[in-house]
Image (cartoon, rainbow, N blue to C red):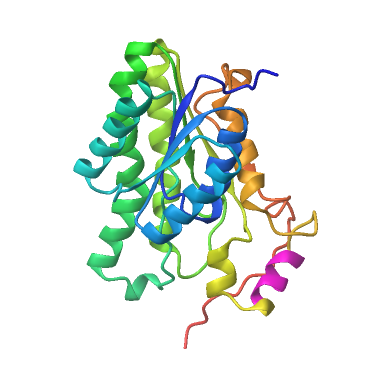
Amino acid sequence: MSKRLDGRTAIVTGAARGIGKGIVTCLAEEGAKVLFTDLNVEGGKATEAELRGHGLEVAFLKADTSKSADVAAMVKATIDRWGRVDILCPNAGIFPETRIADISEQEWDEVCAVNLKGPFLAAKACLPHMQKQRYGRIVITSSITGPRVSSPGHGHYAATKAGVVGFLRTAALEWAPWGITVNAVEPGNILTEGMKLHRDQAFIDAQQSAVPLGRLGTPRDIGMTVRFLASDEAEYITGQTIVVDGGQILPEMQTAILPRAQ
């Protein structure tokens, strides 16, 4: 049986675990050949071995996608291995929790470099290949945090996630003549390894109780949405974002912990 992404190749950044791993899995299950990157070498190799064990054609490469040399190497490795790049999913992101008054210039620059500069560098590096093919699917991982809502401690993260939405709209306009679509997913709270590691059960339960569908999202929920946007079924969708949050942002009345002046 033919799969929707047979013959396509994809790059996914920040994919050793969590949402990125979910994206890689869903693309590869649909027939795509996927090169994925991360700075977590141990996790990346483990994910590569796991997915190859399921018969999926994937390859891991260590890369810092905030650095143009690493991004160029990432694209070259994909072209050298499979001869083309059809799908790009800039997913790598960092999210330190620091109140704006306490954010150092260095921390601000680091968050912007990974979350905003990274997708720009990756898209620009893939562009000539997609233009030559007159085909491309770029699907960026944004967030509901920034474009839709926010919370204390996420000023830099929110700024970058809103920023990629502005970037993708311009890119969608500029690259449409070559048949390249540029979209994003905006995940809500997703139950990843990182959340389990850095948040206690009380926090997870509180987040889950705020979701109308009654559960936190999974990496696969995001991966399935990315898979749709990367397929030919979405060929007439560009410059758009899809919120994947179980209805989290829908209620008119929200409970929020806000800072109080002392």
Q: Nearer the viewer, residue 209 or 249?
A: 209
Q: Is residue 206 magenta?
A: yes
The outermost residue toward the bottom is 262
Q: Nearer the viewer, residue 205 or 83?
A: 83
Question: Is 46 situated left or right of 25 in this image?
Answer: left
Q: Position of residue 160 (x, y in %)?
A: 39, 51
- Residue 40 shows in this picture: no
With respect to residue 256, does 158 lie above or below? Answer: above
* Quadrant of the snapshot with the N terminus: top right
Q: Position of residue 230 (x, y in %)?
A: 54, 27
Q: Is residue 252 magenta?
A: no
Q: Quadrant of residue 108?
A: bottom left
Q: Quadrant of residue 255?
A: bottom right
Q: Position of residue 89 (x, y in %)?
A: 45, 37
With respect to residue 183, does 25 lie above or below? Answer: below
What residue is drawn where x is 60% and y is 38%? 26
**Span colored in magenta:** 203-209
Q: Main secondary structure of the magenta part?
A: helix
Tag count? 0
What residue is drawn where x is 40% and y is 61%? 42
The outermost residue toward the left is 69
Question: Is 33 situated left or right of 220 in this image?
Answer: left
Q: Position of residue 32 (x, y in %)?
A: 53, 28
